[in-house]
Amino acid sequence: MLTSKQRAYLRALANPIDTILMVGKSGMSEDIVKQADDALTAREIIKGKVLETSPLSAREAAEEIAGLTSSEVVQVIGSKFVLYRRNEKEPKITLPKVRKTRS
């Protein structure tokens, strides 16, 4: 689970990257899920867009892809969404550390 600080950090990283995933009128397909999975393995963070012709909202598409690829939804704005999944073998992104709170 991402903290708000980690989420903010990932949002900043996602800003300049290109949208590489497009969900169109056919909605969710195995191809889209595979493309997302491969891209998450290679990049850890990806940006997707839901076209106006899609039967899914950006939130629905992001949640579905995240569930199928074991990734996390970083943000959804309008028709765009950002997903993140840590590459355990070769991590490329170092997230801000989570501070332990005293109880």
Image (cartoon, rainbow, N blue to C red):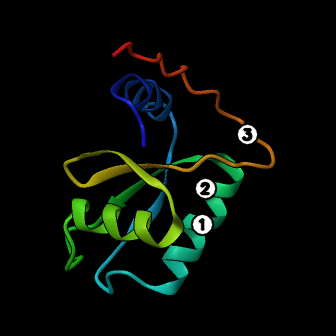
Task: Look at label 3 and name its amino acid.
Answer: Pro
Residue bearing mark 3: 91
Q: Earlier in the sequence, mark 2 or mark 3?
A: 2
How far apart, in angstroms, are the residues tagged by discs 2 and 3? 11 Å
Pointers 2 and 1 in contact (C-beta within 8 Å)? yes
Q: Which residue is mark 1?
A: 37
| SS category of the residue bearing label 1 | helix
Q: The N terminus is located in which quarter?
A: top left
**Gap between marks 3 and 1, in whole Å?**
15 Å
**SS type, badge 2:** helix
**Separation (CA) of disc 2 from disc 1:** 5 Å
Label 3 crowd (10 A; few <14 / some 14-19 / many >=20): few
Place of residue 99 in the rendered image (x, y in percent of width and height, measured from the top left): 47, 16
Tell whether 63 sits left or right of 77.
right
Q: Nearer the viewer, mark 3 or mark 1?
A: 3
* Pointer 2 residue: 40
Q: Observer-nearest residue: 2 or 12?
A: 2
